Each structure stands twice: as C-alpha cells, then as structure tokens.
Amino acid sequence: MSEQVHNRLAVVRAERKVSRQALAEAVGVHYQTIGYIERGQYNPSLDLALKMARFFGLPVEALFSLEPFQLLTDEFYGRNQ
C-alpha cells in the first residue's frame, strides 16, 4: 500500500487560472487524472509530478508532500503555530 501524497494542485491551478483540461494537455494525461490527484484518490508518478511542477515553474515540493500542508493563511500569517 502506498502512502498518500498531499498536494496543493487545485490551489495553484486556481491562482494561475489554469483549467484541469489545460494542465492535463500540457503534461500528457486525461483531465480526470488531474481531478483524482487533487482529491487524493491517485498519487502521481514522479515523472508526472515533475512535469506539473515544471509547468507551473515551481519546485515539486511546492505542489506535493508526504505530510499535510499547512493552510496558506496559517503559513503566511503565522496562525496556529
């Protein structure tokens, strides 16, 4: 059984105004795969995670983690620390 990979994909997509379809086409997968990843129903391969990070111009660690991400408001404004 593989460990869940947490992600910020939906947040980053919304910030950049990128649709699931556009991201999927850019990285070579079906748009439903993006939805499965965002909901935590599917862990991306290393290759796919790196392609998505490259698409957004971010380090892969900004999109994916083995630990749950803090809420962005907590991370940037110091709440609940």
Image: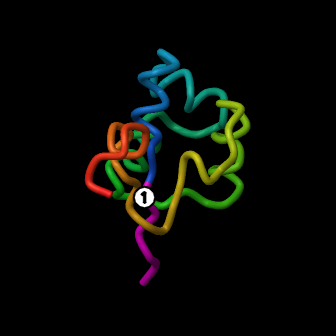
Q: Is residue 40 left or right of residue 16?
A: left
Residue 72 included in the magenta stretch of the image: no
Residue 3 higher or lower than 30, as above or below: below
Left or right placement of residue 8 versus residue 52 in this view = left
What are the residue bounds of the magenta stretch? 1-6
Horizontal arrangement in the rendering, residue 31 relative to residue 39 (left or right): right
The residue that mark 1 highlights is 6
Residue 37 position, x and y percent, is: 43, 50
Residue at the spot 32% in from the left edge and 49% down from the top edge? 39
Query: Which quarter of the picture shows residue 72?
Result: top left
In the image, residue 66 above or below residue 34: below
Give the main secondary structure of the magenta stretch.
loop
Q: Amino acid at mark 1?
A: His
Q: Position of residue 62 (x, y in %)?
A: 58, 46
User: Residue drawn 48% across and 31% down?
Assistant: 12
Q: Secondary structure at mark 1?
A: strand
Outermost residue on the top side: it is: 17
Residue 11's spot in the image, x, y percent? 41, 33
What x and y, as percent, mark residue 29? 58, 40
Above or below residue 51? Residue 49 is below
Label 1 crowding class (10 Å Cα cut-off): few <14, some 14-19, many 20+? Answer: some
Which quarter of the rendered picture does the N terminus lie within? bottom left
Which scheme is used to colour this image of the protein? rainbow
Q: Residue at x 65, y 30 (%)?
A: 56
22 shown above or below 68: above
Nearer to us in this view, 8 or 42 = 8
